[in-house]
Image (cartoon, helix red, strand yellow):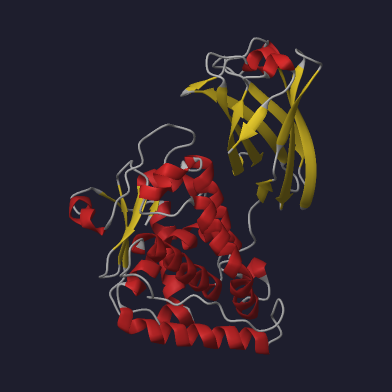
Amino acid sequence: MITTRPKFLCFTVILLSTAVSGAWARTRKINGTPENRIAQEVLRTLLASPLGKAMPRLHYRLVLLDELSPNALSQANGTVSITAGLLPIFEGDRGVWAAVIGHELGHVLLAHPRDLPRFQTTLREAYKNAHASGYDHGPARWPDERLGYGLAKPKASKEQEYQADFIGLMLMADAGYQPGYSVILEKRLLFGLGSEPRFVAVFSHHPRLESREERTLRFSDIAMDIFRSRWPDAAKSPGGNLPPYGTIGDWTFEQSGGGGGQIVFHVPFQVQRSAGMKIRVAAFFLDGDLRVRSSEPKYRATDGSLVLNRFLPGAENRAADVTLQVPSRDLITRHHRLRAVVFLMAGSRPLDVVTRHVDVTGIDAGHIQSGN
């Protein structure tokens, strides 16, 4: 199950489960749209792959629901449901559809433990064939992911999400969707959600998005070997070439000009596949739940809030370190602990977002502190 919410809006995240499938059954279905066609085609492609044929033998179906709460859900009978609220993250990318649908198919497989050995045997064969064909990132290594293990223990919900991610990643690669689409999905979810606070994550059924991304990256090389062995020309694969994607590094900031002056942010980033596009590195600030406002027109958005921007030309591969500056006085607010939200875009596509607390208690003394 995947949950998100619209970009930077402070809505309560309701984590749905298969228990609400009865309520969803009464929700009006969306039919006859381009999204329906893409979703059905991606589902068929996933199930037609060798790994897809090793899935439980069910009557699979995919429905889109006219529900604004962004979510995706699968049932043990093979039904995958995606709400309209989740559709904006797809942006027409079939590979992102495959990442969502593959994850939900992972839950279907985990609900049928008797079928796990057949799936795992087929996966090992795909892995061995990839290495035999010369597609490998190093010595043969088999992932230590034991499907079905630990699901009866405490925190089983999070473990199930991790295992569904793994299954979905391998299904995608086998069917012709690059594993990078799974990371792109997680970046887009993170861009919409922001990272959940740690105390929320403790009680959530879902792992933190950063944790899921780390687990995905652990197995992405293996999945990429399988993908390349089946689809040597990525451009001709069902998912095609990856869209732009990128990551913000560990950004820092400092105060210049003594007790007044400017706050200078140093933001390293990496972007790939952004040739011909404009890269945007930007930041805004939250004082509690409110956007910090700007005292100067050059830093002021149309709603009066403070926004820092840098624009750079895109490239096939680019790494850079940009600076963003803001007058110190604009960060002196009624709360001494702000949240800085730094985000990265290529054209209109969101690529990454990092949120960090900024302690401005000592701003007049010429220094500030940050914390996660």
Front residue of 214/278: it is: 214
Q: Position of residue 36 (x, y in %)?
A: 38, 56
Front residue of 36/274: it is: 274
Whether residue 144 is visible, yes or no, is yes
Q: Position of residue 271 (x, y in %)?
A: 72, 49
Q: Residue furthest right?
A: 257
Residue at image x 42%, y 75%?
47
Residue at image x 43%, y 68%?
163
Q: What is the quadrant of the C terminus in the image?
A: top right
**Numbered marks: total:** 0
Q: Position of residue 270 (x, y in %)?
A: 73, 48
Relative to 188, 251 lies left or right? right
Whether residue 178 is visible, yes or no, is no
Q: Is residue 200 above or below residue 82?
A: above
Residue at image x 56%, y 20%?
336
**Which quadrant of the view contains residue 74?**
bottom left
Q: Is residue 276 above or below residue 103?
A: above
Q: Position of residue 82 (x, y in %)?
A: 35, 54
Q: What is the quadrant of the N terminus in the image?
A: bottom left
Front residue of 371/264: it is: 371
Front residue of 101/319: it is: 319
Relative to 354, 37 lies left or right? left
**Which quadrant of the view contains residue 129?**
bottom right
Q: Is residue 149 above or below residue 245?
A: below
Relative to 232, 11 lies left or right? left
